Amino acid sequence: MQPLLELHGVSKAFGGLRAVDGLTASVRRGEVVGLVGPNGSGKTTALNLVTGNLTADSGAILFEGRPIERAAAHRITRAGIARTFQLVRVMPSLTLAENVAVGAMFGARACSPAEAQERALPLLARVGLAARAEERARSLTYIDQKRLELARALAAEPQLLLLDEWLAGLNPTELKEGIALIAALAADGLTIVMVEHVMDAIRALCSRCVVMNAGTKIAEGTPAEALSDPAVIKAYLGD
Ligand code: ADP
């Protein structure tokens, strides 16, 4: 079966720095794939290339077999890819419900503002924020902003959800809840790629792991296989 997402020899440089350097990887429908690697290995850049927040210098990116490497970010969202950001991006002066409704209106299944508001409530409930739907996003703690951002991404009704360190900074109880939430989304059939440093979460959630270092893929396999690969251990320990 054709992968949902394919990257073929994708590269992106910033000046002389090759942040992503000939990356080839694919994601099948229904998988939860962990994208891991030391800081600066190119993980966030890779996500930004998939979502159209950055444009690749070379290589091909296919979503459902169609090239998206030159497509604008909003078109990629419409095509069915949604994400959260490492540095959360919510709209502080809008209510939680409005924040999520915006995600619905610009997502894969466009809808009226009224329908978008309706779609927002169950999603806020799913991330544990239903009681606060009418509050402004600026009143939320960092962790709740992350929850809100996830609800907004889900409102776009994506086929592929990209999470950029969504579990970072959670306390042990929140982490447990966060892992359970991602597991529930995966059980619903959502395909997920997660950039994550919390290795327990990677082990709990991911069927497969892609490990990057210096812009390239250095290992791939089940979390147990990939994380015990000598090249991976060396990359994490440094030379
Ligand atoms: P990771 O997500 O694995 O920590 P990044 O993709 O954020 O890695 O960064 C990869 C490399 O590219 C790093 O050396 C980082 O400093 C550099 N980089 C990322 N974004 C930019 C940018 N917009 N301009 C210049 N350098 C960047």
Image: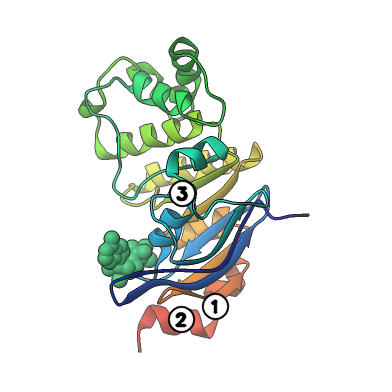
Kind of residue sitting beneath label 2: Ile
Q: Is residue 159 above or below residue 137?
A: below
- Image coordinates of residue 77 in percent, x first then y, are 49, 39
Regarding residue 197, the answer to whether it shows in the image is no
- Identify residue for label 2: 233
Question: Marks 3 and 1, Cα distance to the nearest angstrom?
Answer: 30 Å
Kind of residue sitting beneath label 1: Ser
- Image coordinates of residue 175 in percent, x first then y, are 41, 46
Question: Marks 2 and 1, Cα distance to the nearest angstrom?
Answer: 7 Å
Q: Is residue 99 above or below residue 234?
A: above
> Which element is circle 1 on?
loop
Residue at 49% from the left image edge and 53% from the top image edge: 70
Which quadrant of the rendered structure holds the C terminus?
Answer: bottom left
Residue with the most extreme bottom position: 239
Q: Quadrant of residue 153?
A: top left
**Which circle's residue, 2 or 1, is located before the other in the chain?**
1
- Identify residue for label 1: 228
> Which element is circle 2 on?
helix
Labels 2 and 1 touching (C-beta < 8 A): yes
Residue at 44% from the left image edge and 31% from the top image edge: 151
**Which circle's residue, 2 or 3, is located before the other in the chain?**
3
Kind of residue sitting beneath label 3: Thr
> Which element is circle 3 on?
helix
3 vs 1, front mark: 3
Which color scheme is applied? Answer: rainbow
Residue at 26% from the left image edge and 39% from the top image edge: 142
- Image coordinates of residue 101 in percent, x first then y, are 42, 21
